[in-house]
Image: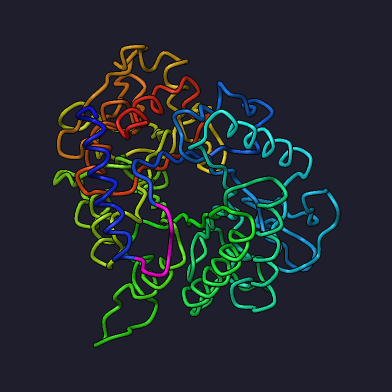
C-alpha cells in the first residue's frame, strides 16, 4: 500500500466514524473524496451526454438538472423572469396529474439524457447518476408539496418509480429555499410557509423510508442529497426551539434522512450589487466592505459544523463559472476590486440559471481572456487575492472586472475540504468547464 492509499484509508475510517455520530438514522455506506457535478439537461443540444463531455472516471456522481414537481396538472414557474409553465409529463411523455409527482421538462430529451448518463456507469463502477429536482426556477411548488401528506406521497412514489425505471441511484432535492422562495411568488399562490423546514424534514423522512424499503428489494442503496443555502438564515430554525435560540435543530433532523448535504458555497457577491466582489472567496478579506457579513466559503462551512452537522455529511460547492461587472472604477490599486460598478457585464456566453452575466471557465479560455497558462489575455490582467484565496481579472481599458475560479483556487479549496474532513466537493456545472481543466484539478486533488 502506497502513501496515498494509506492516507485515503485513514480518511475513510475517520469519515465513517464522524458520519455515524452526526446522522445516526442515515446511511449504510461511506465514501471519501466525493466529486459531484451538475449536468444541465437543457443544454444537451449543444453539450450532449458523451464520455468526453461527462468524464465519469473523474466524477463520483452526476446530478441531472432539473426535474420539477407537478401541481394541478402543471409544472414550471409563470413568473416573467422564468415564464415556462407547461403541462406535466411523466417519463413516458404522458400527461401527469398527481400533485407532487416528479415530471420532466421534455420527456424524450430528458429520458434519453438519463439513459446515456446511466450507460456511463457500465465502465465506471464508482459513478452514480442522481436526478436533481427543483433548482432556482422550479422551487415555487415545494412548499405546497411538503405541506400536503398526499402530495408528499406522490413525490415519494414517483421518485421510487423513476429511479427504478432508469436505473438511477437516487434523488437530490434542490429547494431554494424553504421558508423564503428565491424567485418571486406568482400572485395568488403560496410559495413559502413558516412550517416549510418542518415539512421538509417530513418529506425527506418519508422518502428515506421508501428508498430503504425499495433498496432492500433491489439490493442497492438509494441516495438522498439536497442542495442547501450557505447563509445563516438557511441553517437556523425558523422559530426558537430552546432558550430563545435558533439552533439549527431542523437541519440536524433533516440530515438523519440524507446521505449528505451539497452546500452552495458560491454567489456570495452578485452583479446586482453596486460594487465588485468575489463570488466564492474561501476566506474573509478585511478589505471587502461586506466581510463582516460572513460571505465566505469558510464561514458557511463553519455555520454547518456549529449547527451539529458532521463534516462527513458536508459536500462543499465550487463554481465552475465567474461573474463579470462592467464599468468598474480602477480604485487605488488599479485592479477594480471592491469598486463601484454599473451592473453586470455581458458576453459571458454561459447563460442558464446563473444568468446572462456568467462566464464559464472554458469561455474565458476560448475567448483568450485567459491564456493556456491561466494568465490574463486580450487586455485582462490576472490578480490573486491572498486573503480571499481567489483569482480575478480586470481590464483597465474597458473597466470590466471578473470573479472566477481557476486551478489554483480549486486546489486551495480542496486543501480546505481535506483539512476539515468534509465529504467532498460539488460543482456547477459541467458545460462551464468544457475542457475539464477545473474538473481535472478538482478530481485529482480529491483522489480520483
145 shown above or below 42:
below
Residue found at x 24% / y 54% = 299
**100 with respect to 404 (left or right):** right
Magenta-span inclusion, residue 56: no
Residue 23 lies in quadrant: bottom left
Q: Residue furthest front?
A: 1
Percent of width and height locating residue 157 = 69, 65
Left or right: 241 as drawn, with respect to 418: right
Query: Residue 283: x percent and y percent?
Result: 20, 45
- Would residue 145 appear left or right of 310 to someone viewing this image? right
The residue that appears at 26% across and 86% down in the rendered structure is: 244
Q: Tell me residue 250's x, y (percent).
A: 39, 74
Quarter containing the N terminus = top left
Segment tinted magenta in the rendering: 23-29
Q: Left or right: 44 with respect to 87?
A: left
Foreground residue, 407 or 396? 407
Amino acid at each position: 500500500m502506497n502513501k496515498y492509499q494509506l492516507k485515503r484509508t485513514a480518511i475513510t475510517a475517520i469519515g465513517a466514524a464522524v458520519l455515524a455520530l452526526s446522522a445516526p438514522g442515515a446511511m449504510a455506506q461511506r465514501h471519501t473524496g466525493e466529486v459531484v457535478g451538475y449536468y444541465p439537461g437543457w443544454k444537451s443540444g449543444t453539450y450532449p451526454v458523451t464520455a468526453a463531455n461527462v468524464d465519469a472516471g473523474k466524477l463520483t456522481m452526476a446530478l441531472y438538472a432539473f426535474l420539477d414537481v407537478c401541481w394541478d396538472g402543471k409544472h414550471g414557474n409563470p413568473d416573467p423572469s422564468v415564464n415556462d409553465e407547461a403541462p406535466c409529463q411523466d417519463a413516458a411523455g404522458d400527461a401527469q396529474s398527481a400533485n407532487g409527482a416528479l415530471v420532466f421538462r421534455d420527456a424524450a430529451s430528458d429520458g434519453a439524457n438519463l439513459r446515456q448518463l446511466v450507460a456511463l456507469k457500465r465502465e465506471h463502477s464508482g459513478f452514480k447518476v442522481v436526478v436533481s429536482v427543483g433548482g432556482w426556477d422550479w422551487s415555487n411548488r415545494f412548499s405546497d408539496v411538503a405541506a400536503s401528506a398526499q402530495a408528499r406521497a406522490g413525490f415519494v412514489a414517483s421518485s421510487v418509480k423513476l429511479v427504478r425505471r432508469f436505473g438511477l441511484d437516487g434523488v437530490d432535492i434542490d429547494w431554494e429555499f424553504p421558508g423564503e422562495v428565491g424567485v418571486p411568488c406568482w400572485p395568488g399562490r403560496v410559495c413559502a410557509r413558516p412550517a416549510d423546514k418542518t415539512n421538509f424534514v417530513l418529506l425527506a423522512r418519508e422518502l428515506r423510508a421508501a428508498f430503504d424499503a425499495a433498496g432492500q428489494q433491489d439490493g442497492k442503496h438509494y441516495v438522498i442529497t439536497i442542495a442547501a443555502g450557505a447563509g445563516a438564515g438557511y441553517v437556523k430554525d425558523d422559530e426558537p426551539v430552546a432558550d430563545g435560540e435558533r439552533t439549527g435543530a431542523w437541519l440536524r433532523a433533516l440530515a438523519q434522512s440524507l446521505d449528505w448535504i451539497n452546500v452552495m458555497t458560491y454567489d456570495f457577491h452578485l452583479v446586482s450589487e453596486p460594487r465588485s466582489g468575489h463570488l466564492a472567496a474561501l476566506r474573509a478579506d478585511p478589505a471587502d466592505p461586506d466581510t463582516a457579513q460572513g460571505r465566505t466559503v469558510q464561514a458557511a462551512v463553519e455555520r454547518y459544523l456549529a449547527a451539529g452537522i458532521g463534516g462527513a455529511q458536508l459536500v462543499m460547492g465550487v463554481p465552475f463559472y465567474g461573474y463579470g461587472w462592467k464599468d468598474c472604477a480602477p480604485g487605488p490599486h488599479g485592479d477594480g476590486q471592491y469598486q463601484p460598478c454599473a451592473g453586470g457585464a455581458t458576453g459571458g456566453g454561459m447563460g442558464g440559471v446563473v444568468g446572462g452575466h456568467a462566464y464559464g471557465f472554458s469561455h474565458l479560455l476560448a475567448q483568450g481572456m485567459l491564456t493556456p497558462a491561466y494568465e490574463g489575455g486580450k487586455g485582462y490582467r490576472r490578480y490573486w487575492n491572498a486573503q480571499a484565496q481567489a483569482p480575478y481579472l480586470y481590464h483597465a481599458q474597458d473597466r470590466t472586472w471578473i470573479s472566477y475560479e481557476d486551478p489554483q483556487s480549486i486546489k486551495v479549496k480542496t486543501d480546505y475540504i481535506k483539512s476539515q474532513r468534509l465529504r467532498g466537493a460539488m460543482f456547477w456545472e459541467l458545460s462551464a468547464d468544457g475542457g475539464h481543466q477545473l474538473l481535472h484539478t478538482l478530481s485529482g486533488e480529491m483522489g480520483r
